[in-house]
């Protein structure tokens, strides 16, 4: 055994263990308003506790751990803690282009399924999306919404041939696998002349999406239905979208066939999927590690639960997505955009 390699591995373990426990601390900081209060300026634990209605000793220990992890800055001379501009940007605004607590909320919610997932590993059975903890549904929306907010209207939709012009003049769009409706409502807010129908097989997510529409005052132009990717209705649509969900489906080719049937001639299917290469070696990096982890807990088990004729997983890559599209009879497929976390494709009927 190489002692240096072993020590390097132990260092990796210590970092991972701290990150695992630190995820809970980040979620606490978000839920208790500690980050938002700390963004107002340097504070002692007592001051921050008083401001947030929390116990000072708990806050003190939380701040120390956050400082050790690099999520909070500490000034030894004054005994105060504060957030840098970068930390404020990433930790305090759930509607901004980057919001880290949502990702941790999703991850911790997924970990609740360990006992059920261990059983699934042994039996080969699936674990449906609907079987997970509430934090999975809410955390997923909070994890993905910032990226959609930053890129969907300004970059991804304009990259599609002629789609923005149709949406501006008045088009019909379907958002399949919409979850809590973040992508649906972002498009509806940007294009007031168009109508949008979101669909998801998970009734509770649809319930939360409908509440969001009411809160945003989008009633009349946005509807949500409880339906799977092979059963949603009311086409034909000018645009169909699937955001980070095609790889979760038990029958992605069946979904693609149904989407083709629901599109008008010349209609567009916007596919947004996790960033991934076509081979395992291409995905052996920090982003791939995150998505393989989520895929183990959420994506593959859900696809198996839906019959699993083809379980793509969150790191399927462009080649696998193109194959699904080709088998469904589409003749036009191209990658139109990408970010560190997503690949974006245009498919035409």
Image: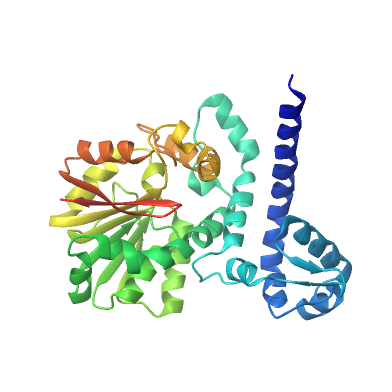
Q: Which residue lies furthest to the left in this view?
A: 265
Residue shown at 41% from the left, 73% from the top: 213
Residue 301, placed above or below residue 58: above
Residue 230 spot, x, y in % from top left? 29, 46
Residue shown at 49% from the left, 47% from the top: 129
Residue 313, placed above or below residue 47: above
Q: Nearer the viewer, residue 141 or 307?
A: 141
Residue 98 spot, x, y in % from top left? 53, 64
Q: Look at the image and tell me in which quarter the N terminus lies.
A: top right
**Would residue 208 be visible to someone looking at this image?**
yes
Does residue 175 appear to the left or right of 299 in the view shown? left
Q: In which quarter of the image is residue 49?
A: bottom right
**Would residue 234 be visible to someone looking at this image?**
no
Does residue 30 appear to the left or right of 242 in the view shown? right
Residue 294 spot, x, y in % from top left? 53, 44
Does residue 180 appear to the left or right of 41 in the view shown? left
Residue 207 spot, x, y in % from top left? 46, 64
Q: Which of 265 and 126 is in front in this view?
A: 265
Residue shown at 85% from the left, 71% from the top: 55
Q: Which residue lies furthest to the top in this view?
A: 1
Q: In which quarter of the image is residue 219?
A: bottom left
Q: Which of 196 and 345 is in front in this view?
A: 345
Q: Nearer the viewer, residue 119 or 322?
A: 322
């Amino acid at each position: 055994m190489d002692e240096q390699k072993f020590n390097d591995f132990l260092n990796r373990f210590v970092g991972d263990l701290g990150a695992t426990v630190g995820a809970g601390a980040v979620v606490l900081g978000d839920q208790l308003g500690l980050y938002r209060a700390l963004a107002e300026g340097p504070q002692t634990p007592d001051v921050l506790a008083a401001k947030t209605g929390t116990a000072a000793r708990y806050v003190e220990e939380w701040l120390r751990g956050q400082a050790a992890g690099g999520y909070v800055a500490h000034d030894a001379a004054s005994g105060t803690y504060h957030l840098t501009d970068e930390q404020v940007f990433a930790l305090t605004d759930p509607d901004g282009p980057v919001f880290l607590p949502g990702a941790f909320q999703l991850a911790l919610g997924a970990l609740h399924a360990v006992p059920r997932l261990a059983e699934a590993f042994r039996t080969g059975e699936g674990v449906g999306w609907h079987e997970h903890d509430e934090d999975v549904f809410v955390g997923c929306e909070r994890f993905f919404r910032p990226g959609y907010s930053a890129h969907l209207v300004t970059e991804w939709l304009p990259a599609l041939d002629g789609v923005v012009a149709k949406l501006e003049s008045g088009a019909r769009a379907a958002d399949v696998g919409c979850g809590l409706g973040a992508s649906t409502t972002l498009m509806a807010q940007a294009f007031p002349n168009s109508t949008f129908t979101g669909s998801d097989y998970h009734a509770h997510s649809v319930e939360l999406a409908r509440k969001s529409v009411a809160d945003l005052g989008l009633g009349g132009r946005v509807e949500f239905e409880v339906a799977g990717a092979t059963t949603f209705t009311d086409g034909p649509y000018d645009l169909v979208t699937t955001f980070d969900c095609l790889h979760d489906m038990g029958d992605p080719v069946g979904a693609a066939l149904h989407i083709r049937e629901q599109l008008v001639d010349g209609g567009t299917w916007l596919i947004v999927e996790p960033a991934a290469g076509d081979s395992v070696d291409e995905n052996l990096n920090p982003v791939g590690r995150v998505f393989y982890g989520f895929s183990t807990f959420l994506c593959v088990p859900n696809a198996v639960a839906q019959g699993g004729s083809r379980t793509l997983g969150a790191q399927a890559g462009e080649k696998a997505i193109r194959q699904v599209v080709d088998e469904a009879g589409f003749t036009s497929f191209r990658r139109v955009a990408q970010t560190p976390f997503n690949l974006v494709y245009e498919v035409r009927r």
